[in-house]
Image (cartoon, rainbow, N blue to C red):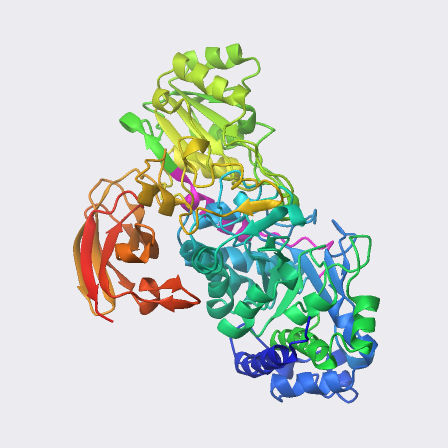
Amino acid sequence: MTPDTSRNRARHGLAVATAAVLACSAFAVIGTANLSGRAAAATSNCPWVGSHAPIATRVREVLGNMTLDDKLAMVDGTGFSYGTAGYVGHIAANSRLCVPGLNLEDGPQGVADGVPGVTQLPAPVALAATFDPSLARAYGTVVGGEEHGKGADVNLGPTVNIVRDPRWGRAFESYGEDPYLSGQTAVGYIGGVQSQGVMSQVKHYAVYNQETNRNTPADDVIVSQRAMHEIYLPQFQAAVTQGKAASVMCSYSTINGQYACQNSGIMNVLDQQWKYPGFVTSDWGATHSTVASALAGLDMQMPGGSGFGTDYYGAPLKAAVQDGQVPVPVLNDMVSRILGEMFRFGLFEHPPTGSLTATVTTPAHAATGRAVEEAGTVLLKNAGGVLPLSSRRDPSIAVIGADAGSAALTSGGGSAGVVPPYVVTPLAGITARAASGSVTYASGDPVASAVAAAKSASVAVVFASSYETEGSDLTSIDLPASENQLISAVAAANPDTVVVLNTGSAVTMPWLSRVRGVIEAWYPGQDDGDEIAAVLFGDVNPSGKLPVTFPASLSQVPDSTAAQWPGTGGTVQYSEGVLVGYRWYSTKHITPLFPFGYGLSYTSFAFSHLVVSGDRVSAWVTNTGRRTGSDVAQLYVGDPASTGEPAEQLKGFQRVTLRPGQTRRVSFLVTRDDFAWWNNGQWTVTPGSYTLRVGDSSANLPLTAHVEVRR
C-alpha cells in the first residue's frame, strides 16, 4: 500500500486548528487560575502545562520533545481489567513530559465492566424511546460525572449502531433503527458526558449490526455506498459534528472486504467529508494490521499485546516507522490527535483524581434514571381502559412472573452491563404503591399457582423478559416458550391481564388479542419496581415511543433470508439497501405488530393546522383527553418516486407536554439535507414534489403537505 501521508497531515492540521477554537467551549479546558500545585510546579519543565497558547502550539511543543518510543507509547494501549482491578483501557503517563495517563472505561449505560458503587441507568434503548435529547443530556451527565468520579478520562459510549434486525444481541445498548433519532439522542448524551470533563468515544464505527462471526472475515458486510451514507453513517456524523465527540471507536466489522479499523473508505469519510479532529481507537482486539491501520487513520490500538490478541502497534509499529512503511508524519498525526483532545479537556492541568473503588452513585443520579425510564416506557395496548390501576377498581392485584421477583431483569450483558447498587423489584414497587390493596405473587412455576392467583385477583400483571448480551445474537424474537404459555394461561384465567415486557428490542406476542394491556419497559435499571408501579397506577402518564418496529414475525423483517442474516459463505448481504426498519414496512406496505414511533397514553392527542413557510414546518398539537400527558410530534419526508428513496423518513421530532384541552404549536426546521439522497458519490437533491407528513408514529401521520423543489 502506498503511504497516503497527505491525508494524515491534512487531518492533523484540522485537528489542532479546531481544537484551538473548542478550547473556549463550556466543556473544554479548565482555566489555569486553578492549577494544582503539582501542575504549576511542572510548568517550568513542561511549559505547555497551564499555558494559554493555542492547543496547536502546545501539541507541537510536546511532540517536539518526544522520542520515538514516547510517541509509540501514546498510541498503544494496555488494560482489559474488570471491577476495581484496573481500567478496561489505559495509556501510560509520561512523567518526563508531564503527560498524564489516559483511562478508558465502558459506559453506554453507566460505568460498566463490573465496577461497583455506580448507578445502573435504564438501557440506552429506553433513553431512545423518550425521543428527548434533553433527557439524553441529563443521562449523559450522570454517566460522565460517575466516570469522572471513578478516575476515567474516556467514556466508551454511546453505541449508535443501527438495529438492522431485532435479533441483534446489542440492540438494548443502541438507540434503535433510525439514524436521525440515534444521532440526536447521541448528541444529547455526548454533551452531557463531556460537560463533566470526560471524553466521549462514540462507537462502533461502522456498519456493525450483529454479533454472529464478529471480528472475523466471515462477517464480511457487503453493503452499498448509498446504504452506508444514508443509514449506517449519519448518526456518527451527528455525533462528531454536532456532538463534538472527542473520539470514535472503530468496529469489529469487515466492510466490503476490509476490516473497519483499516478501512480507508470509512476513515476518509471521517477525515475528508466530516473534517473530524478527534482520535480513533480500535475496539478491543479489532486491530488486524500495523501499516494498513496506521495509514488508514487508526490512532490508538486497544488494548495492545496484553493477552488480548496480537499487538500490531508497539514493536511492529516501531519497525514500520523505522523502515519507512509508516512515515514519521503519520505517527506524529496519530499522537497529535490524542494530545489535542487531552489539552482540549484540560487533562494536563487536571489529571484524574477519582478511583475505581469510590462510590459515585447519588440519589440525584438515581432520580435521573427514574425520569428516563418513566418517559421511555411504552404503552402498547390498553383495551377497555384497564390501565391505570386504581385501588377502588382493582382492590386485588396478582403479580406474576419470575421477572417480577428476585430474577428481575434490569440490564443487558456484555460491556454495557452495569452492576446495580440495589434493585427494586416490580413486586416490591407494586406492593409499596398499592398500600391498602391486596397484592399476591406467583412466580409462574408451576403455572397452576399463577392461574390460581390470577383467578382470585381483580387484575393480573404478568412480567416477562428476554435477555440480550454482547457476543451473541438471538435465534428468534419470541419470548421463551414457558413465558408465552404462562401469559396465555393467566389471560384465560383473568380477562383483565396486563403484560409488562422487559426486553432489549422487539418480541412477538402470540397472546396479544387475549390480554387487555401491554407495556414495554425495556431493561429499566435499578429502580425497576418503583418506575413500573408509577406507570401502572397512573402517577406517571406513559409517553414513550418505539425506537424500533415490532414485526408480527421474523418473516416480516427486511433481512429475512440466511444470506442477509447472519450471512452465508463468509458474507452478509445488506441487499435490503436503505429499506431498514420502518422504511421497509412503509415502502412495502407491510403492517407490523407495532410501528416505529408508536406509543399510547392515558390521554389522547390531535394534530391540526399544518403550515409550511419557508424552511419551517409547523403544526398544532392538542390534548383532547382528561389527563396531562406528553406526545412526540414526528415529521417525515417522502421523496419523489424517481429517487428510489423509502416512502417516508424521519427528519424531525419534538416532545410536547400538554394539560387537558391545551394546544401548542410545534415547529421543525427543514433544510436541503432533509431532501438529499446519496447518488453516485455525492448528496443530491432531485427536483420534484416532496411530501411532508406530521403525526405521532410512522403509521399515524394525519397531516400532509406537498412542496415543490425546482432545483
Quadrant in which the N terminus appears:
bottom right
- Per the image, is 359 magenta? yes
Q: Residue at x 31, y 63 (%)?
A: 675
Percent position of residue 609, x then y: 15, 55
Q: Compare residues 600 and 148 and report the one nearer the observer.
A: 600
Q: Find residue 258 and report its horizontal and vertical position in percent.
A: 63, 58
At 64% from the left and 50% from the top, the residue drawn is 118
Which of the two residues, 536 or 612, is positioned nearer the viewer here? 612
Q: Does residue 180 appear anywhere in the picture? A: yes
Identify whether 15 is placed above or below 193.
Answer: below
Residue 274 shows up from this direction = no
Quarter placement of the C terminus: bottom left
Question: Up-down: is 284 above or below 403?
Answer: below
For image coordinates 43% across by 32% down, the residue present is 555
Left or right: 530 as drawn, with respect to 708: right
Instruction: Determine which quarter of the picture holds residue 642.
Output: bottom left
Query: Residue 293: percent from the left, percent from the top?
Result: 69, 66
Front-most of 188 and 475?
Answer: 475
Q: Which residues are magenta?
A: 352-378
